[in-house]
Image (cartoon, rainbow, N blue to C red):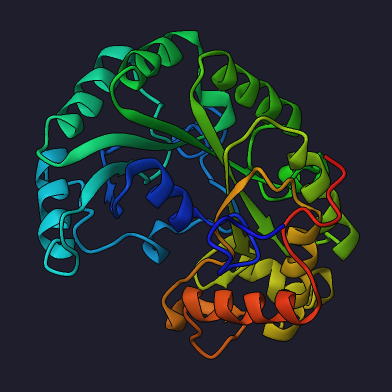
Amino acid sequence: MANDGGILQWNDYSSYIRRTFGQRVQKISVNAGFTCPNRDGKISTDGCIYCTNKSFSPFYCNSDDSISEQLRKGIDFFSPKYNAQKYLAYFQTYTNTYDNINALRRKYEEALLVDGVIGLVISTRPDCVDDEIMRLLADYAKEKYVEIEFGLESTKNSTLELINRGHTYEQAVDAIMLVQKYGIMSGVHLILGLPYESEEDFYLHAERISQLPISTLKLHQMQVLRGTRLEKLYDENKSAFADLSLENYVRIVSNFLDILNPEIIVERLTSESPREMVLYPDWNGRKNFEVSHIVNAFMKKNGMFQGRNSKG
């Protein structure tokens, strides 16, 4: 069946937030000055081949400001738009568990002390969580909302190696199981359209993650951004890339949702970068919400809804 609200054909994040909190809750992005083991030399100095944080950092997310200052600026930006809302501190930039435990405690607690902040969403890598970190987060989760987001990107190890992720799919599964052990929500990010992956691979991803104890999913279409190593690969071999025209992506993501475990909350279907940065695919500046409307209409027309053909 479709989601509880009957509006969208998938289990959407906005409806989940309303069910959970009874009001609108806005994420406020934070750049807490973390780095990444894929950049500082522990694993690599090159980073992922598609990576450029310039594509998604809002103006108030500036590591020159303290965490509390960033949150207050974000709240000042959003509060005139919406009434009576609460906030989640979204530790977004780079790997937000990659530090010693005392530094992590200081950063997380600074965020939680900001008026109106009711929880943490922490973006990190599967190879950067352990029991000590999870015990800290489990303490916060007794009174606050806590979720960990993992950059999974693909369930194929050959792809993870190609894009220089520096971890395996098995490590991601282990990290998700660790988070589950501590009773904390976890989510994953997945990119559809990475080089050399086929449409069958995309649906295999859906089947695999449907078996994992995750709560949320963010889907991203693969974007070739200027100034990345992915741009060089695209210039050299365009045949390595799937057809990500808007029409085809709508069909692919609809089929993906059709076989996705209906219990997984879908937070987004696409990513959005400044148009001048995007080389491929060119969707004429379509916004995320516009693509969601198109996908929803396609799924309704074709009798599709999340989990209709799930094997989970």
| On screen, residue 200 above or below 101 | below
* Residue drawn at (32%, 34%) of the image: 120
Q: Tell me how many marks there are.
A: 0
| On screen, residue 286 above or below 199 | below
* Residue drawn at (81%, 78%) of the image: 302
Q: Give the camera-side residue of 8 and 101.
A: 8
Q: Is residue 92 left or right of residue 130?
A: left
Q: Horizontal and vertical percent for residue 262?
A: 70, 48
Q: Horizontal and vertical percent for residue 79?
A: 14, 61
Q: Quadrant of residue 91?
A: top left
Tell me the quarter of the image containing the C terminus. Answer: top right
Q: Is residue 291 left or right of residue 59?
A: right
* Residue drawn at (28%, 62%) of the image: 58
Residue 194 seen by the camera: no
Q: Horizontal and vertical percent for residue 205?
A: 79, 48
Q: Horizontal and vertical percent for residue 39?
A: 47, 39
Residue 245 seen by the camera: yes
Q: Give the camera-side residue of 243 and 188.
A: 188
Q: Is residue 112 left or right of residue 290?
A: left
| On screen, residue 128 above or below 284 | above
- Farthest-out residue, bottom: 284
Q: Is residue 96 left or right of residue 151?
A: left
| On screen, residue 86 above or below 51 | above
Tell me the quarter of the image containing the N terminus. Answer: bottom right
Q: Quadrant of residue 251?
A: bottom right
